[in-house]
Image (cartoon, rainbow, N blue to C red):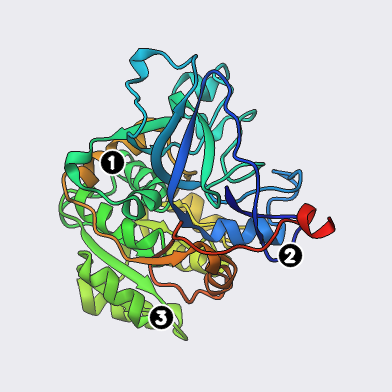
């Protein structure tokens, strides 16, 4: 199979032919038809996760995976309801099944679990072995394309879980303002979920690019504000002009930079709630006294579980999710990782496995 493999940090991926993986009894061999390109993939290459998720090389990135069933292990039970040829998406967090988080269904935050795309197999290859219980079958009658489904497993999943937390916190509804900060791969979906889940709240999108804000407006944002080069006072003035209020009741940060989080908290109303899903930066720096005295609530929210993804898939099957996609060839992975690093991609880049030549493997070159 073709695979884009990582042989070290801060190096381009090597596009090569490698052996198609064999599957264990409880696994399914998935033919990858589309793999979303996430900024996390860039961070993986740069060593962002080197302490928390050390890699053994070579590794294959790509954790947003959609495709079809190629082969089923003998240990997969009939109740898995899987057959060769079925269209599927891959649930990203694979837990140990016995810890407290796994027992309640949050396997993506299992302390002893693993994730596809952070080890020997990932979506940047034509086939990937997946435990049968981490597949969700998609009925083909909905005519959903693999390149639409793949981003839903992270870019379309992570903000969904985050906005559910804001809803559970009771800070959205009529006469409330919810802010979506950052309109990249995650933010374009966050805007849509804010409209779907916030019970009539006013949705305001914040970003530094007019092109990205145009996507937010198309996807349902009531107002958009370009924050590039503006002070908090400037941004607050625009917020008042747009909504009649200088504060937000709820915010979801899809960037995760120190300055974007600080901006969100500077705008947050008393007893407001804020959720972080982005991971651009490495730390949080917000004033303590307002946090305590105004009783802010701050949620971290990581990826999503099986049930969350099932709900997202149901929304997609109902035609309620729009996509801003850039479909790219396998051969152009490295070029697009650079564009992703520089913030030049609007929406989500998705790798598809069109025919094309690849470089020989390192083993072949050595021979």
Local packing at callout 2 (Cα closer than 10 Å; few below 14, some 14-19, many 20+) is: few
The correct choice, above or below, for 350 with respect to 111 in the image is below
Secondary structure of the residue carrying numbered label 2: loop
The correct choice, above or below, for 152 with respect to 230 in the image is above
Q: Is residue 149 left or right of residue 105?
A: left
Local packing at callout 3 (Cα closer than 10 Å; few below 14, some 14-19, many 20+) is: few
Q: Spatial distance from mark 1 to mark 2, Cα to Cα? A: 35 Å
Q: Residue at x 76, y 43 (%)?
A: 56
Q: Earlier in the sequence, mark 1 or mark 3?
A: 3
Q: Is 36 or 333 nearer to us in this picture? A: 333
Which percent across, then down, holds residue 8?
Answer: 77, 57
Q: Residue at x 51, y 58 (%)?
A: 38
* Viewer-side label of 2, 3: 2
Which residue is denoted by mark 1 in the rendering?
313
Which residue is denoted by mark 3 in the rendering?
233
* Viewer-side label of 1, 3: 1
Identify the disc placed on residue 10. Answer: 2
Q: State the image quarter where residue 110 is shown.
A: top right
Which percent across, then down, holds residue 165?
Answer: 36, 42
Q: Is residue 92 visible?
A: yes
Q: Is residue 125 left or right of residue 191?
A: right
Q: Spatial distance from mark 1 to mark 3, Cα to Cα? A: 40 Å
Q: Residue furthest bottom?
A: 229
């Amino acid at each position: 199979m073709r695979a884009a493999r990582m042989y070290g940090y801060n190096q381009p991926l090597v596009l090569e032919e490698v052996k198609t993986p064999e599957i264990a009894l409880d696994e399914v061999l998935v033919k990858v038809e589309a793999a979303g390109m996430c900024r996390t993939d860039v961070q993986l290459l740069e060593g962002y996760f080197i302490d928390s998720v050390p890699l053994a090389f070579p590794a294959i990135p790509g954790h947003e995976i959609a495709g079809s069933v190629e082969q089923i292990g003998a240990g997969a039970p009939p109740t898995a309801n899987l057959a060769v040829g079925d269209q599927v998406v891959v649930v990203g967090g694979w837990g140990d099944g016995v810890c407290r988080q796994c027992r309640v269904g949050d396997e993506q935050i299992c302390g002893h679990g693993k994730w596809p795309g952070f080890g020997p197999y990932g979506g940047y290859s034509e086939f990937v072995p997946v435990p049968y219980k981490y597949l969700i079958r998609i009925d083909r009658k909905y005519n959903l394309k693999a390149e639409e489904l793949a981003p839903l497993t992270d870019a379309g999943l992570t903000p969904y879980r985050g906005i559910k937390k804001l809803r559970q916190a009771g800070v959205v509804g009529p006469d409330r303002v919810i802010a979506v900060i950052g309109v990249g791969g995650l933010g374009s979906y966050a805007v849509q979920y804010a409209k779907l889940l916030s019970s009539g709240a006013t949705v305001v999108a914040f970003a530094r690019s007019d092109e990205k804000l145009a996507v937010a407006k198309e996807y349902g944002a009531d107002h958009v504000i370009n924050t590039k080069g503006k002070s908090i006072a400037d941004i607050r003035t625009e917020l008042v002009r747009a909504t009649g209020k200088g504060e937000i009741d709820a915010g979801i940060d899809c960037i995760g930079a120190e300055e974007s989080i600080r901006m969100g908290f500077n705008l947050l109303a008393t007893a407001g709630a804020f959720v972080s899903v982005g991971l651009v930066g490495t730390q949080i720096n917000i004033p303590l006294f307002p946090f305590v005295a105004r009783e802010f609530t701050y949620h971290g929210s990581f990826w999503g579980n099986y049930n969350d993804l099932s709900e997202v898939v149901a929304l997609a099957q109902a035609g309620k999710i729009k996509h801003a996609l850039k479909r790219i060839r396998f051969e152009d992975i490295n070029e697009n990782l650079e564009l992703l690093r520089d913030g030049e991609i609007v929406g989500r880049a998705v790798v598809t496995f069109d025919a094309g030549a690849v470089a020989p493997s390192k083993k072949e070159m050595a021979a």
